[in-house]
Image (spheres, rainbow, N blue to C red):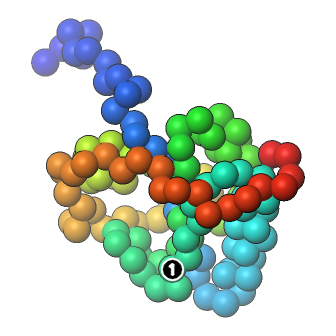
Amino acid sequence: MNEDTVSPRPLAEIASYHAHIYHDGQTERQHAEWPRLQIGERFRVRLGWHEQKVGPHDQAIYQVSFANDFFASLVPWLILNYKGLSILLHPNTTNPRRDHLVDPIWIGRPLAVNGDILTDDHEAEEALPPNTNPSQPA
């Protein structure tokens, strides 16, 4: 099929975003705590924390779930403040496998993602309710 005849995918496919910030071992975990604290002080997001492998991720992570409205401020902030950590940033559409494996953005060093456990068809996840109360400017 000629790419010129394919319609672009609409932005409305994206219900929200996740940033998965990886850490491996106690030293890197402590290093990862600073950006997490700063994110919570600056952005209305939902922060999670996983001490072990979870989902398709082969390392411990914390997750930042955020609404589309925060992409333009949060992602540049992550680029400037990732502290050498690996961050997988992906949209949430109806295809989690594509979101994690085909359409992500990596900040820092890309890592392996176990796509075998992800589905090709799923309800798009809206941003999880924020559990932060920002007090600082981005």
Please name the amino acid that badge 1 sits on: His
- Asked whether, in this view, residue 4 is left or right of residue 26, the answer is left
Q: Position of residue 48 (x, y in %)?
A: 55, 71
Q: Residues within 10 Å of mark 1 (few under 14, many from 20)?
A: few
Residue at left offset 31%, top offset 24%: 9
Extreme residue toward the left, this view: 1
Residue 31, image x and y in percent? 75, 76
Q: Quadrant of residue 134?
A: bottom right
Q: What residue sits 22% from the left and 15% below the top?
A: 6
Percent x, y of residue 4: 26, 9
Left or right: 108 as drawn, with respect to 33: left
Image position of 3 with respect to 83: above or below: above
Answer yes or no: is residue 89 visible: no
User: Helix or strand or loop: what does disc 1 sit on?
Assistant: loop
Q: Residue at x 48, y 56 (%)?
A: 128
Where does the N terminus fall, quadrant-wise? top left
Looking at the image, residue 38 lies above or below residue 2: below
* Left or right, 81 with reference to 5: right
> Seen in the image, is 13 located left or right of residue 61?
left
| Residue identified by numbered label 1 | 50
Single out the residue that lies furthest toward the bottom: 26
